[in-house]
Image (cartoon, helix red, strand yellow):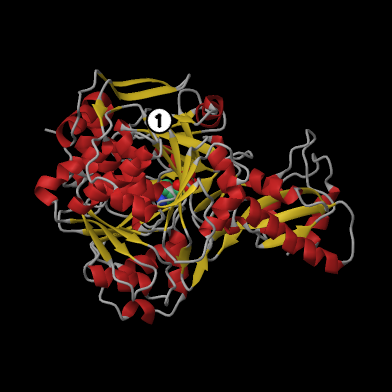
Amino acid sequence: MSNYSIKNLEEYFQVYRKSVRNPEMFWEEIAEEHFIWRKRWDKVLSWDFKKPEIKWFEGAKLNITENCIDRHLRTKGEKTAILFEPNDPKEDAQHITYNRLYERVNQFANVLKDHGIKKGDRVCIYLPMIPELAISTLACARIGAVHSVVFAGFSSKALATRINDSSCKMVITSDGSYRGSKTIDLKGIVDEALEECTSVDTVLVAKRINSEIKMKKGRDKWLKPLLEAASVECAPEIMDAEDPLFILYTSGSTGMPKGMVHTTAGYMVYTAYTFKNVFNYRQNDVYWCTADIGWITGHSYIVYGPLANGATTVMFEGVPNYPDWGRFWDVIDKHKVTQFYTAPTAIRALAKENIECVDKHNLSSLKVLGTVGEPINEEAWHWYNDNVGKKKSPIVDTWWQTETGGIMITSLPYITPTKPTYATLPFPGIQPALMDENGEEITGNQVDGRLCVKYPWPSMARTIWGNHQRYKETYFSAFEDMYFTGDGALRDEVGYYRITGRVDDVIIVSGHNLGTAPIEDAINEHQAVAESAIVGFPHDIKGNALYGYVILKETGESRKHENVRKEINQLITEHIGPIAKLDKIQFVKGLPKTRSGKIMRRILRKIASKDTSNLGDTSTLLNPEVVQDIIDHSI
Ligand code: WT7
């Protein structure tokens, strides 16, 4: 018997030991007992971190939607699968049952097929958080098309880059989206992006805001009539375990975003098993993750993980402050939410508001609270624990990444004693290691180092779309035979892990992963800019905000400077999206560089954080004189 549902700390340790002693047997038992397979695997795992090549459940055949939908119909057909809560609280919520989800996914799948989409084709989904987003994702999986969901806050240029990188044949979008009291012209953004894309034949458009939009003849089609005419039956495409399920882009330290490729069987098994245990999901629970499906959190823990367990998963279209800062708590009371999973940046923003916003709510349905996306500071942790959880709902601080597919280090609610700011213990099957700068593993407790993983787990990304070499260099070259996460971590006296933050050129702003290079590239497009460097600095709500040091080609009067500041942020908005805008821009005469020409970001980070007491030895710099000047004029 597998330990699909872990019941106490002793059992956790026992399961964990088993998962390390014999990982293949461990995962095989879980896979065998809890999923539908059209054909069993020939081999549980083959791997080589040098190539790197990782295969789980090789030879098995399955369809993930059969596991997420069809198999629940007999016992849970009338249970709500997706509970849609719209942006406007006056609009009715929608309870989409498993029976209805089955029909809607199949109809959508048939529309995709009618438009020439086949197994292996890439489909770009650029939609707000409306049911069509989850349904179109599942429809792709139904027919074996590879979905590439692009967060609908990205700009047209960022969208075009992603469409082109994986040569998508189709884009699924909507006329527009709601964001609090505003609307956004999504279709306009798609039209602009497609001027730079040649691979797209069809654009399917959902109606959401009833705006007047242009429809390009032959290319653009309204979804509704197509869906209504489509059959509610569509046989699932039978996939190989290692067939790609989706591509999801994440930023890297160099220009192009990385299209992380996740495959079918391992991803399904791991997201399902983690969802069950990390959120302690029980059959009548109403689970709510506030992330957008445009991020991995939404893929794994709004769509696939919950549905694989026959859960009720809330999809929220709105924002935390519309119509007011009590919205999250209204939704929890309205739908009797039992598990609530959100980001530290949202918690910090909510904590700034009048405590009445929370206190006038009941919140007694809550059993488990979760956080994800960045380290949670102690103050925010306590605020969440005291005011939302009323000290009775355990907080699970879940550490993971787009690349890991599922939660890796976390406490289990009602099982692992929590410790503020600590993600605590590895999930079964995960073997973390802390490494020093010489590539040696640091053993023992009360140590810190670079966080790696020693052994494969089922939901790890298998490659970067079209660039396996970059996958190898980014994740498997820093330390031999290890997956390198890019994060630093410490391990305390009992073996709990605390993630301390990125050790590479990625900065996490409001829980969004931003690479410095693409932002610098955008800034450098400005004709007045000679060179630039971006660093992060601590920010009350966002966690980190961006500080830009910019060298201008010519120094001019300050009015001009003000314009350049605005134009730089405009360029960033165009190239990446508003989330990457700079909070501070300082014009400098030079950037501190090593003798080999590398920008010393460490020094710039300290100056931006107003921590200039100990800058270290600057005398070996190529241009030590610029440092004092930057300090003197820092903002
Ligand atoms: C990076 C991954 C995984 C879903 C959302 C982010 C940071 C994530 C935590 C946490 C401290 C965290 C790491 C990681 N991070 N969760 N609980 N505590 N840091 O996915 O965009 O791929 O970002 O987010 O730095 O490497 P992502």
Q: What element carries label 1?
A: loop
Query: 284 left or right of 130?
Result: left
Residue in the foreground of this view, choosing between 602 and 156: 156
Residue type indicated by callout 1: Gly
Label 1 crowding class (10 Å Cα cut-off): few <14, some 14-19, many 20+?
some
Residue sitting at x 23%, y 49%: 103
Residue sitting at x 49%, y 38%: 168
Coordinates of residue 242 in the picture (x, y in percent): 34, 26
Residue in the foreground of this view, choosing between 142 and 9: 142
Q: Compared with residue 158, is residue 256 higher up or lower down, i.e. above or below?
A: above
Coordinates of residue 225 in the picture (x, y in percent): 35, 54
Query: 377 left or right of 105?
Result: right
Q: Which residue lies furthest to the front in this view?
A: 217
Residue in the foreground of this view, choosing between 73 and 599: 73
Query: 228 left or right of 439?
Result: left
Quadrant position of residue 339:
bottom left
The answer to whether residue 433 is visible is: no
Quadrant position of residue 261:
top left
Q: The C terminus lies in which quarter of the figure?
A: bottom right
The residue beneath circle 1 is 120
Q: The N terminus lies in which quarter of the figure?
A: top left
- Label total for image: 1
